[in-house]
Amino acid sequence: MADRDYKSAFIDFLPSMAKRLGTGGLLEELCRGFYHLVDSERGLITLESLKQNAKKLGICDLGEEQAEAMLRMGDLNGDGALDHTEFCILMLRLSSETIKAA
């Protein structure tokens, strides 16, 4: 699944969430996603934890390439993983782009 396809899966759902929850509520909900994807030993989202936990959440078509792209896009400090702040910033960026596209 290409990056654009991955984002397009949320186009219908995200605007309605934003309308229902408001901006602050939407960001809070998106940030909670961190805890579903985190490597519990490292306290970060790693490539392996992202792939493994995405499957548990039903995101079965998240391939290696898409997971790597997501990490690269959000990794602001260059450590190859996402901390909570980096994840929240990434979710904000992706949700803003998605809502604008809708």
Image: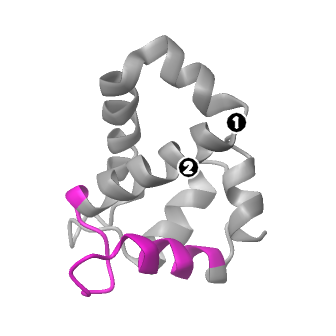
Establish if 92 lies above or below 21: below
Q: Residue at x 74, y 46 (%)?
A: 9
Work out whether residue 100 or residue 94 is closer to the camera in this orientation and state it: 100
Give the quarter of the figure containing the N terminus: bottom right
Provide the residue span drawn in magenta.
66-85
Q: Secondary structure at mark 2?
A: helix
Q: Secondary structure at mark 1?
A: loop
Q: Residue at x 66, y 30 (%)?
A: 13
Q: Residue at x 39, y 58 (%)?
A: 90
Work out whether residue 93 or residue 55 is closer to the camera in this orientation and state it: 93
Pick out the residue farthest to the top: 20
The mark total stands at 2
- Label 2: how many residues lie within 10 Å, few (<14), some (14-19) or many (20+)? few
Relative to residue 58, is residue 91 drawn left or right? left
Residue 36 lies in the magenta-colored region: no
Relative to residue 77, is residue 56 drawn left or right? right
- Label 1: how many residues lie within 10 Å, few (<14), some (14-19) or many (20+)? few
Disc nearer the start of the sequence (1/2): 2
Q: Which residue is mark 2?
A: 97
CB atoms at circles 1 and 2 under 8 Å apart? no
Relative to residue 55, is residue 8 drawn left or right? right
**Toward which corner of the image does residue 99 lie, by quadrant?**
top right
Residue 50 on image: x %, y %: 48, 67
Work out whether residue 87 or residue 34 is closer to the camera in this orientation and state it: 87
Work out whether residue 89 or residue 97 is closer to the camera in this orientation and state it: 97
Q: Which residue is mark 1?
A: 102
Residue 68 on image: x %, y %: 53, 81
Give the quarter of the figure containing the C terminus: top right
Name the kind of residue labelled 2 in the image. Answer: Glu
Cα gap from disc 1 to disc 2, whole angstroms: 9 Å
**Toward which corner of the image does residue 77 lie, by quadrant?**
bottom left
